[in-house]
Amino acid sequence: MSSSDGSTAQQRILLTQAEAGMVLAEPVESLKKAVLCMPGTTLRDDLIHRLMLLGIKRVVVRGNPSNSRPALSVEQREAQLEQRFSRVANRPLMKKLRDAIRPHLGDDLQ
């Protein structure tokens, strides 16, 4: 994961883009500058959710996740959509949003 100059690749992403298994490259701090997570912490779904509740908007992760993802099938995208909305499945408005997204999951595959 190191570049030719010896530095490690990292990327600042929105917390909503974070996925379980990603590893933090920099500490996550609260609005009052208290360290919530140290570099090297592996993100889990419950941790991502807690950070969202604390108002964290962005994190810096190791690697370059936005450029390294393989193309997903429609079935894989459907499963991912369900997983992403699982935290808010009981909210009617979020259910409508999920249902509005579903028909477009394969738009870029055609």
Image: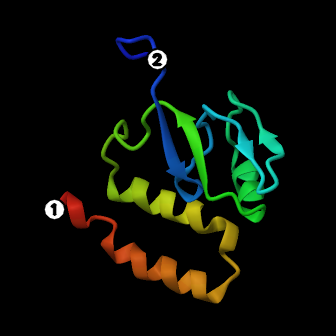
* Residue drawn 57% across the image and 40% down it: 60
How dense is the environment of label 1, judged by Cα within 10 Å: few (below 14), some, or many (20 and up)? few
**Local secondary structure at mark 1:** loop
Read off the residue under disc 2: 7
Depth check: give the residue in front, 54 or 32. Answer: 32
Q: Which colour scheme appears in the figure?
A: rainbow
Q: Tell which tag, 2 or 1, sits nearer the viewer.
A: 2
> Dots 2 and 1: beta carbons under 8 Å?
no
Q: Name the quadrant containing residue 28.
A: top right
* Residue drawn 49% across the image and 58% down it: 79
Cα–Cα span, label 2 and label 1 = 38 Å
Left or right of 1 in this view: 92: right
Q: In which quarter of the image is the C terminus?
A: bottom left
Amino acid type, mark 1: Gln
- Which badge, 2 or 1, is on the more N-terminal residue? 2
| Numbered circle sitting on residue 29 | none
Q: Quadrant of the N terminus?
A: top left
Residue 52 x/y as whole percent: 70, 61
Could you tell me how many numbered marks the image carries? 2
Residue 69 x/y as whole percent: 37, 40
Q: Name the quadrant containing residue 78.
A: bottom left
Amino acid type, mark 2: Ser
Residue 53 x/y as whole percent: 76, 64
Read off the residue under disc 1: 110
* Residue drawn 82% across the image and 54% down it: 32
- The relative height of residue 1 versus residue 27 in the rendered view (above or below) is above
Q: Name the quadrant containing residue 42.
A: top right
**Local secondary structure at mark 2:** loop
Left or right of 102 in this view: 19: right
Residue 24 x/y as whole percent: 63, 35
